[in-house]
């Protein structure tokens, strides 16, 4: 099935594993993680493997990668609507630094209590604004064309791995 939210089509099911592996490869490189935390988050979000729980799951994974790289994101100070808008733009235009720029003012030294840090972040209560949409079958030619366009954008950016 093809999954989207707010008009953004997430990775084709056959590409989810590649997108997440690429995000983890970027995130496990401490230099890349420090320089491009938004790009890493974008690839984690692009993978979007679940119909529910993606935000919470990727925030935990991203927070661990950030902590390993020696910093944290002050999620409690971010504006959820502005963050989601920047994330949507990152997904639609990968590797342009859109989400990196949004997150930059919220970068802090690594926290010692990661559990508490994540628990204070807004939006982790499972409450939903937009909901994920099952757009239809991946066999649908119109959906296949959307995936093709999406992949072309990513290939143009030199990131065809995900």
Image (cartoon, grey):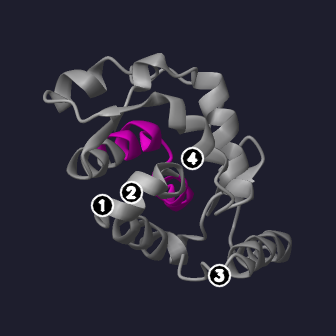
Which is nearer the N-term, disc 1 or disc 3? 1
**Going 78% across and 73% down the picture, which residue do you hit?**
140
Q: Give the label, 1 or 3, closer to the camera.
A: 1
Q: Are marks 2 and 3 in contact (CB under 8 Å)?
A: no
Q: How far is the residue under mark 4 from the one under mark 3? A: 18 Å
**Going 81% across and 74% down the picture, which residue do you hit?**
149
CA neighbours of label 4 inside 10 A, class few (<14), some (14 to 19), many (20+): many
- Looking at the image, is 87 positioned above or below residue 11? above
**Going 39% across and 24% down the picture, which residue do you hit?**
124
Q: Which residue is mark 4?
A: 100
The residue tagged with tag 4: helix, strand or loop? helix
The residue tagged with tag 3: helix, strand or loop? loop
**Going 75% across and 80% down the picture, which residue do you hit?**
156
Q: Considering depth in this image, is 52 or 107 the residue closer to the camera?
A: 107
The x and y percentages for residue 46 are 56, 58
The circle on residue 158 is: 3
Q: Which residues are magenta?
A: 42-60
The residue tagged with tag 2: helix, strand or loop? helix
The quadrant of the image that shows the N terminus is bottom right
């Amino acid at each position: 099935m093809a999954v989207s939210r707010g008009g953004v089509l997430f990775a084709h099911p056959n590409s989810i594993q590649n997108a997440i592996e690429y995000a983890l490869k970027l995130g496990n490189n401490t230099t890349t993680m420090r320089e491009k935390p938004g790009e890493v988050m974008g690839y984690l979000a692009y993978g979007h493997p679940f119909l529910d729980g993606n935000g919470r799951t990727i925030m935990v994974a991203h927070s661990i990668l950030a902590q390993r790289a020696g910093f944290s994101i002050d999620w409690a100070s971010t504006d959820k609507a502005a963050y989601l808008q920047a994330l949507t733009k990152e997904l639609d235009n990968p590797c342009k630094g859109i989400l990196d720029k949004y997150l930059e003012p919220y970068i802090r030294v690594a926290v010692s209590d990661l559990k508490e840090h994540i628990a204070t972040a807004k939006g982790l209560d499972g409450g939903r604004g937009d909901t994920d949409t099952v757009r239809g079958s991946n066999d649908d030619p119109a959906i296949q064309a959307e995936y093709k366009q999406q992949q072309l954008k990513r290939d143009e950016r030199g990131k065809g791995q995900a």
